[in-house]
Image (cartoon, grey):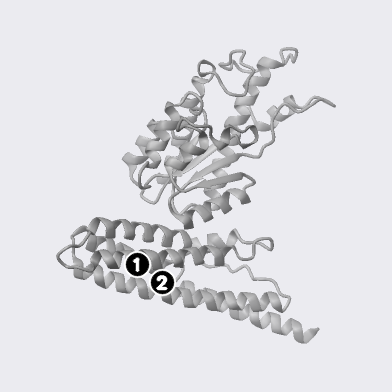
């Protein structure tokens, strides 16, 4: 029984450290904390479900913006701007800080119809969302391990 | 004029409750699937019944404002609050707000606008058109709790008005309330004209205080 407690405590410690590091490295912001508040034993998958919807959104929007930016002589900046707006909104809603910040630069490129700049931002936003997806998958795996070991998910306070 | 006061008035010993269940039914409108999921959870956690739709057009369909019978015509699906995103393709949140306030059937439903952009003229425009409040995205639990309290307080005032006219035998003194003897739950325009402006004033101070 003592051994089990140690395993749980270790997993909880790993989870906590990992989550804190994601905030410290700027992957996540306060809105992610707000989302975690909405999760409880009755809805243990809430955050995972929301971010899953977000990543699907990212993929879809990046694809359509890529198509709009494809031909240099015929860029639909309105469509790109609309895509960036949506991406900025949803990244903000889930606390995906780096993705959101790229969207701010992305919008500026759109506003001045800078196709090259847009393409760079598109690439960057693609990189950032995929990076975050990997990080959060690791986080959720840790969460799952804690639950399977019979432990509770720690409430983590981010300063 | 506290809510507690209203509740004591409303529940005579052994008598039947005249105040309806405190569960608000909220219609949430947002074109973003992520935001719909989040707002739905925020509202459910705050003990509200929630229906989410993806556009202003769908919202009007749900309410039956498009000329057809809406789902919310069914008695137990009556909508108590509409929360809508501002920037949506097609009908914007502002357009939706206007349509609702133009409708004699639905103008009493409080409408709250959400936006990721903190534009003062936009906020003023919405309040002027009759929006109850304006939330800056991303929306947090504290925002939803505040809105719920605001709506419940307004509903309690409305019920107090109704019950006061219904229960003439209760002898207590109440401040002059601008009620006429309407006993139905769907308000007659004339009896509640005074309320919307006072609600707007409250919302303005609620919204602008954080900016100070």
- Camera-side residue of A120 and B70: B70
- Please report the residue visible at 47 percent of the width from the left and 56 percent of the height from the top: B33
- Please report the residue visible at 46 percent of the width from the left and 64 percent of the height from the top: A54
- Camera-side residue of B210 and B82: B82
Q: In this image, A133 relative to A122: left or right?
A: right
Name the chain under label 2: A
Q: What distance separates the C-alpha of mark 1 from that of mark 2?
A: 10 Å
Name the chain under label 1: A
Residue carrying label 1: A62
Q: In this image, B187 relative to A131: left or right?
A: right
Mark 1 or 2 closer to N-term? 1
**Which of the numbered marks, if any, corresponds to residue B176?**
none
Q: Is residue B50 above or below residue A33?
A: above
Q: Quadrant of the N terminus of chain B?
A: top right
Describe the element under mark 2 as helix, strand or loop.
helix
Q: Is residue B72 above or below residue A128?
A: above
Residue B173 lies in what quarter of the image?
Answer: top right
Q: Is residue A108 visible?
A: yes
Q: Residue lying farthest front?
A: B68
- Please report the residue visible at 50 percent of the width from the left and 29 percent of the height from the top: B106
Q: In this image, B156 relative to B89: left or right?
A: right
Q: Is residue B173 visible?
A: no
- Please report the residue visible at 58 percent of the width from the left and 32 percent of the height from the top: B73
Q: Is residue A36 above or below residue B18?
A: below
Of the two numbered discs 1 and 2 in the rendering, the one whose residue sits closer to the viewer: 1
Q: Residue lying farthest bottom?
A: A3
Decide: marks 1, 2 in contact (CB < 8 A)?
yes
Residue A17 lies in what quarter of the image?
Answer: bottom right
**In the image, residue A93 lies at what x, y percent?**
46, 58
Other-residue count near label 1 (Cα within 10 Å), few / some / many at <14 / 14–19 / ≥20? many
**Which of the numbered marks, if any, corresponds to residue A129?**
2
**In the image, residue A74 lies at what x, y percent?**
17, 62
């Amino acid at each position: 029984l003592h051994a089990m407690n140690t395993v749980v405590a270790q997993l909880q410690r790993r989870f906590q450290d990992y989550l804190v590091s994601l905030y410290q490295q700027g992957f996540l912001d306060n809105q992610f904390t707000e989302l975690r508040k909405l999760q409880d034993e009755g809805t243990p998958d809430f955050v995972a479900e929301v971010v899953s919807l977000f990543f699907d959104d990212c993929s879809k929007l990046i694809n359509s913006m890529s198509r709009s930016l494809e031909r240099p002589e015929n860029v639909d900046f309105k469509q790109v701007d609309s895509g960036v707006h949506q991406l900025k909104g949803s990244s903000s809603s889930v606390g995906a800080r780096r993705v959101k910040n790229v969207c701010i630069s992305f919008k500026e490129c759109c506003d001045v119809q800078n196709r090259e700049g847009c393409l760079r931002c598109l690439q960057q936003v693609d990189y950032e969302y995929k990076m975050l997806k990997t990080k959060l998958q690791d986080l959720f795996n840790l969460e799952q391990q804690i639950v399977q070991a019979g432990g509770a998910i720690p409430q983590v306070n981010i300063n | 004029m506290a809510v507690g006061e209203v509740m004591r008035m409303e529940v005579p010993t052994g008598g039947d409750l005249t105040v309806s269940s405190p569960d608000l039914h909220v219609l949430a409108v947002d074109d973003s699937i992520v935001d719909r999921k989040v707002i739905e959870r925020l509202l459910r956690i705050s003990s509200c019944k929630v229906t989410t739709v993806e556009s202003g057009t769908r919202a009007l369909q749900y309410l039956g404002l498009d000329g057809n019978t809406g789902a919310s015509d069914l008695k137990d699906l009556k909508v108590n609050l509409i929360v809508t995103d501002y920037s949506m393709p097609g009908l914007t949140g502002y357009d939706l707000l206007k349509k609702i306030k133009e409708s004699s059937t639905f103008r009493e439903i409080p409408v709250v606008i959400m936006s990721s952009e903190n534009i003062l003229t936009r906020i003023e425009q919405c309040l002027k058109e009759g929006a109850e409040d304006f939330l800056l995205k991303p929306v947090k639990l504290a925002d939803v709790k505040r809105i719920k309290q605001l709506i419940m307080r307004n509903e309690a005032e409305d019920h107090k008005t109704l019950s006061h006219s219904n229960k003439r035998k209760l002898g207590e003194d109440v401040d002059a309330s601008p009620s006429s003897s309407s006993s139905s739950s769907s308000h007659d325009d004339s009896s509640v004209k005074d309320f919307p402006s006072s609600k707007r004033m409250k919302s303005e101070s609620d919204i602008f205080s954080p900016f100070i």
